[in-house]
Structures are given as structure tokens and as C-alpha cells.
Image: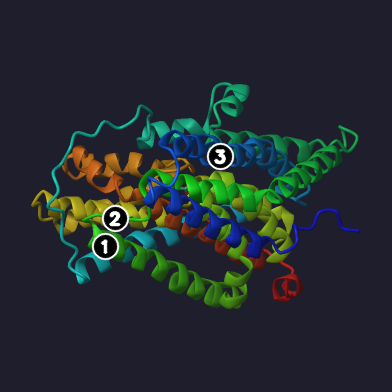
Amino acid sequence: MNTLSAPENLTRNVLIGMGLGVLVASIFYYSPNLVPQTLSLGIEKYIFNLGGQIFKNLLMLVVVPLVFFSLVSGISSLSNMVKLGSIATKTIGLYLLTTAIAVSLALFFGWALDLSGSTGEVVPYTPPPGDSSLYGTVLRIFPNNMFGAFIENNMLGIVFISILFGIALNLTDDLTDGLSKSFERFNIVFLKIVLLIMSLAPIGVFCLMGSYVMDKGVDIFGDLAEYVLILIFVLFFHLIFTYSLILKFLANLNPITFFKKMRNVALFAFSTSSSAATIPVTLKTVTDDLGVKKDVSSFVVPVGATINMDGTAIMQGLATMFIASTVGVDLTLVQYGQIVMLAIVTSIGTAAVPSAGTVTLALILGSVGLPLDAIGLILAVDRILDMIRTAVNVCGDAAVSCIVGKSENEFNQEVFDSKN
Ligand code: ASP
């Protein structure tokens, strides 16, 4: 029996969990007199919030060891280091390309659909501490303390350390009596932990959705409907058109099969709003269902979750236009170019956790001379947008994994074509 197969009917059960979470929480939210307020606050705190947070913690808990063991075992089993160079170059090149397309689409549609600003009042906004500048981002790749990087959840640093360790292990395999095999075994154990956590997903997403709805209800639009609708449109446009085109033309793969197999990953990303928390599910789907061999997926997926955020770049492009229009600033062509470059850099530096994109947005606004306080305007609607853009972010990681896997001959077409 294959003990590494996904829980049965996962998508169906996760969808049911989501629907029930929204339904039950809406009943409490919109009928405040149904039960005493203390009871409804207790349900919000101890069922929805606590349950949702535990589920996200469980996923995050496994991310660091999973990324470490899968990268180390993937790299240590490569036939030579030239292959790693080729995989890395293609991966990073494609990530930069898709992000550039994403933010350009955002700016194009923002202009073509004449996105206008808000009439709302700009309230003071204080960005949380942390260095998301280019300097700080590059420095995070090279931590000065190996264990510190793991403890601080510094994903860029962890990826770098894992690559370094994997290369050293690969080059010393004869001297270490096949130590790499042990990492392979640990990797299997962590994959099993992922599967155990995934079997709790229907309850986890029930709590997460419930906690979102109990907080703000389902009125997600506020007075920012135009910004929200154009943003959702561009996110779907990029998801459906850009990824279909690159899959078809760069790898000759059927986009419909790709999207069908990505539904669980997209649901996990949507309900956790975190590409990092979704890494375990993305890694499993890309390897077991889309047919990308482990040598490639173990590198492309964690790197993608850390540096590739097309959905975030789309939000940042449109939010910058929206804020410029709100404060009555006409952006010049040079500034549009600057936004494209900055969105590429900041999406690399954005942490793969909820709402991180709005933090790094401050960097773009500051660079084109717009007031940071205006970020407060879009925060009201950012919850649902974060969920959708995270789903786009992870689909981008998986699409690039397939393309790199195919071009490196590290791809199993039969697995990709198979039904699941
Ligand atoms: N939540 C996003 C992610 O994890 C990042 C963001 O745009 O806020 O991919």
C-alpha cells in the first residue's frame, strides 16, 4: 500500500469545510442577537481563530524541515553541479519574466480600464519594522548564523543554506558512506507528516474561513469596488492566460490538466493566505500529480514560494496606480517603468505570509514619491485579495516547475496526463 498518497476526496471535503465555515460564521455575524454576545465572541476566539491558527501553525511547522530535507536530498542526488546551475538559471529567469508580465498586465489594465482613486480619508499608516529594501533582501540570503536563519524562519537564508549543504553532500558522498540516503529518508518522513496534516484540512479551512467572516462579514468591497474588481480581473487573467500560454508554448503541456491538478494547492493557498504554509502541498502536487521529478521540484517550489509572487506584484502595481489617483498624482512613463522594476524586486523580498505584500508596497510608494499613509485605504479590502493573490502566486511556482522539469528532461509525462 502506498502510504504516501493524499487523503481521499480532499478537494471536495476542503470545499465543504470552506462553505460551512462561511455559512456558520455568517449566521453569527449577521444575527448578533441569536446567541449571547459572550458566547459568540467565545466561538469566534476559541473555535474559529484558535482552530484556524493551529492549522496554519501545523503547516508552517513542517515548512522549514521539509524545504531543508527536500532541497538537500534533491541536490545531493543530482548527477552533476552543471545541472543545478542550469535548473537555477532557468528557474530564476522564468520567475523574473512571469513577474514582469504580471505587473505590466496590472499597469496596462489599470490604465485601459481607467482605474480611479478613492474618496476615502487617508489615515496614518505605520509600516511594521523589518528591512525589505534591496540591500536587506540580498543580505537575508546570506545569514551569518546557520541556526539563526532556521529559528527566524528566514526562508531566503534557509534556501541558501540547504543548497550549500546539498552541494557539499553531493560532492562528498563517497567520503560520507552514502549519508545522502539518510536525508532522503527524513524527507519521506516529513512528507508523511504533511499528509497527516492535510487530512485535517477540511476542519482547518472551516475555522480559517469562519474566522475571516466573523471578523468583517462578507462585505468585502467597501467603497473600493473598482480597485477590487479590476485587481481580481487581472489576477484571473494572469492565472488563466499567462500560465496557459507559457505552459503550452514553453513546455507543450495541457493547461487544463495543469489547473485541474492544482485545485487543492490553490484552495490551500486561498485559505491560508500564505505561499510558505502551502509549500508542503505544492511540493507534493508538483511531484506526485504533475510529474516533475524531485530533483527539480525540490529546488523550484521552495525557491518560488520565497521569491516568485506574481499575484503580489499585480496588487502592488494596481495599488500604486490607485493611490496615485487618490492623491491626485499623474504617474509618468518613467515612473511606470520604475514600478515594474520595483515590483519585481519587492516581490522577491516579500515574505510568503499573509498581508506581507502590503508591507513591501511601502517601498514602491516611497520610491515614486507617494504617501505611505495611503496604504491604510486598501487594507480594508486586503483580506480577500490576499487570499486570491496567494493562490496565483503558488500556481506560478507550479507552472514554472513544470516548464523547468520538462526542459531538463526531469518530467514524467504519464503522471502529468494521468487522472487523479
Ligand atoms: N500572502 C502572500 C503570499 O504568501 C504574500 C502577499 O502578497 O501578501 O504569497
Does residue 133 sit above or below 217 in this rendering?
A: above
Residue displayed at 64% across by 35% down: 61
Depth check: 255 or 260 in front? 260
**Which residue type carries mark 3?**
Ile
Depth check: 29 or 260 in front? 29
Which residue carries the number 3 mark? 47
Residue displayed at 73% across by 35% down: 168
x and y percent of residue 159 in the render? 60, 39
Q: Alpha-carbon distance for marks 1 and 3?
A: 41 Å
**Which residue type carries mark 1?**
Leu
x and y percent of residue 211 in the render? 47, 44
- Can you tell which of label 2 and label 3 is closer to the viewer? 3
Which residue carries the number 2 mark? 317
Q: Alpha-carbon distance for marks 2 and 1?
A: 6 Å
x and y percent of residue 18 in the render? 54, 57
Does residue 220 sit above or below 362 in this rendering?
A: below
